[in-house]
Image: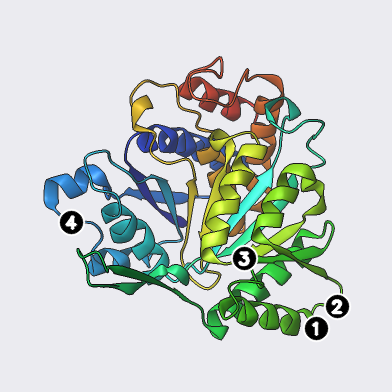
Amino acid sequence: MYKIAVIPGDGTGPEVIREGLRVLEAVSKKYNFSYQTKIFEFGGQYYLKTGKTLQDKDVEELKQYSAIYLGAIGHPEVRPGILERGILLKLRFDLDQYINLRPIKLYNAEFCPLKDKGAKDIDFVVVRENTEGLYKGMGEFQNKGTPKEVAIQISYNTRFGIERCIRYAFQYCRKRNKQKKLTLCGKTNVLTYAWDLWERTFYEVAKEYPDIQTDYAHVDATCMWMVKNPEWFDVIVTDNMFGDIITDLGAMIQGGMGIAAGGNINPEGVSMFEPIGGSAPKYTGKNVINPLAAICALSMMLENLGEDNAAKAVEEAVIKVVTTKLKSLAAGKMGYSTQEVGDLVIENIL
């Protein structure tokens, strides 16, 4: 019996989560597992109504669940940063979800913006450190509001945090068992303190994984090769900021935000799974948003829970729908409504 905490969130979040939960119901019946869900109303509307984001007692309750299924957080009437820090980052930090896992996988070459690239070329994974770096929120203003103002933002990196992320990436690369190549993405030529530590740790840990090839690329070169030769990559490991940037580029080459899913992973605790496209408020309530990213996130959640066959069945149903049914992955251009896309996935679960 799995206990799933559901945070539909803002904007189109509830719409895509609705379809994901319908798929979960269908696949649970076919693969004979049980689950319970509880809805948590955290998000912009909740903040506007109560003045609260996420409290410590909420985090303690969430620790009792098998996984968290998140729709989207972001509200046009809430100043940027409040919800992100008060909900998303608090969840990641307080639940120690130290890995952000982002598969970059193209299902249909027709939806890829890259010339002459197909599904065999775009199939890699980004492992992003998720609780340190620039997103730690450390820094200060000096002489604020004056012509001599200085803003200092600190990138906080620990050997412990880096090593556990890198070790996860090596283990994931081995389990994935494709090219068996792990690329460190950084900026050693300029960010000489943080990336000296990252690079030294990477090559020290690599000695324990002789079956895994290793290489290194600067983050700007990584962006270039993701466009020019994405087939070079198998698994990429990087820090919080660079991971945030390159995974959005990855979403575009795999077909867009409508198909991009991610997991915030605590291998020893509670993990959270979500579509990465945001709340898309302009599409709210129109039944036109693409739910496939949320359904792919559901597949990731099932795999994380150990329901590998169910996870594979959901992904294969998504592939069938993307390759045979949809005109586009963009909101309002799919040729089907949000609910109809959910129906198509359910129909194709084998």
Residues under labels 3 and 2: Cα distance?
20 Å
Query: Where does the image place residue 216, in percent across and percent down from the top left?
Result: 75, 67
**Residue behind mark 4:** 52
* Disc on the earlier residue, 4 or 3: 4
The image shows residue 146 at horizontal and vertical percentages of 20, 65
Q: Nearer the viewer, residue 59 or 256?
A: 256
Which circle's residue, 2 or 4, is located before the other in the chain?
4
Residue 205 horizontal side relative to residue 14, left or right: right
Query: Could you say where residue 32 lies in the image, as x and y percent from the top left?
Result: 58, 46
Amino acid type at circle 4 is Lys
Q: Residue at x 26, y 60 (%)?
A: 54
Q: Earlier in the sequence, mark 3 or mark 2?
A: 2
321, 54: nearer the viewer: 54
Compute the Cα span from label 2 to label 1. 6 Å
Q: Along the horizontal axis of the image, is 48 left or right of 182?
A: left
- N-terminal-most mark, 1 or 3: 1
Q: Which residue is drawn at the image coordinates 28% and 47% (left, top)?
A: 43
| Mark 3 residue crowding within 10 angstroms, few (<14) / some (14–19) / many (20+) | many
Establish if 55 lies above or below 115: below
| Amino acid type indicated by mark 1 | Lys
- Which tag is nearer the camera, tag 1 or tag 3? 3
Q: Which residue is mark 1?
A: 207
Q: Front-most of 198 and 4?
A: 198
Q: Secondary structure at mark 4?
A: loop
Circle 2: element type: loop
Q: Quadrant of the C terminus?
A: top right
Q: Secondary structure at mark 1?
A: loop
Q: Amino acid at mark 2?
A: Pro
User: Label 2 near label 3: C-beta < 8 Å?
Assistant: no
The reply, left or right, for residue 87 in relation to residue 335 is left
Disc 2/disc 4 C-alpha distance (Å): 49 Å
- For disc 3, the marked residue is 238
